[in-house]
Image: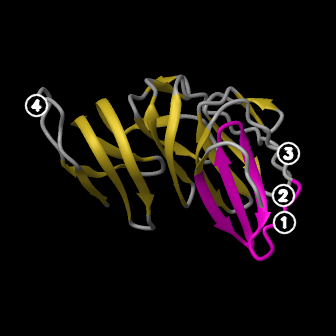
Amino acid sequence: PTIQGEVYCLAVDEGIVYVGGGLHILALDVVSGAPIPFAADPDGAVFSIVPSGEVLYVGGSFTSVGGQSRAGLAALDKSTGAATTWNPSPNGTIGAIAASDNRVYVAGSFSEIGGRPRLGLAAIEAGAPVGHALAQGRVAIFEVRARELAAQFRGRFDRVGLAVDLDRGVVGAIVGGVAPGQGEGQPVGPLFR
């Protein structure tokens, strides 16, 4: 198919390719490329799409998507594109998302999410919009990965801290990076349980 505008991200799930870009989220049949009805209609750019169970987590610079007011981050019904009730409301742009079990990891240029201060990187319970702080300072994320036993964040951080498991408290420290006040920072390695 011909797609008008810029494409920033792709995700493939259950025979469907989801395409995110400037002012669009498209669903296409993975074999034929034919469009599949999907009415997400964001009013801004979509930089990240992550399928997880029955939803698509989408992040970007939009203020509404899936027929609802959603600032930069939303969970959409995979079959319709309608926004679910999940609404963490970051106060900036989301550039990367990863989902694992009941947790959604997000990175971008925000200083608050779920009504709490979270500077650029947060873990959010999939069923509730409260984010846990994972890093502080200027964050430029290039990649976020979530796995069963670890989450890995790559980018440049001013400061790093502890990750918090929503069910059991502290899980582990982010390894690598720099101490506070050491300027630009270094790539940060894995987070271990």
Identity of the residue drawn at 76% across and 56% down: 2
Q: Secondary structure at mark 4?
A: loop
Q: Is residue 148 above or below residue 102?
A: below
Q: Earlier in the sequence, mark 3 or mark 4?
A: 3
Q: Earlier in the sequence, mark 3 or mark 1?
A: 1
- Whether residues under marks 3 and 4 lie with C-beta atoms below 8 angstroms apart, the answer is no
Tell me where the magenta segment starts and ends, as one range.
9-37
- Whether residues under marks 1 and 4 lie with C-beta atoms below 8 angstroms apart, the answer is no
Amino acid carrying mark 2 in the image? Ser
Report the Cα–Cα distance between label 2 and label 3. Answer: 9 Å
**Disc number placed over residue 172 in the picture, else none:** none
Mark 3 vs mark 4, foreground winner is 3
What residue is shown with label 3?
39
What residue is shown with label 4?
182
Identity of the residue drawn at 68% across and 26% down: 63
Mark 1 vs mark 4, foreground winner is 1
Report the Cα–Cα distance between label 2 and label 4. Answer: 47 Å
Q: Position of residue 65 (x, y in %)?
A: 75, 35
Q: Secondary structure at mark 2?
A: loop
- Whether residue 161 is visible here, answered yes or no, is no
Q: Earlier in the sequence, mark 2 or mark 1?
A: 1
What residue is shown with label 1?
34
Amino acid carrying mark 1 in the image? Ala
Circle 4: is it few (<14), some (14-19), or many (20+) Cα within 10 Å? few
- The answer to whether residue 25 is magenta is yes
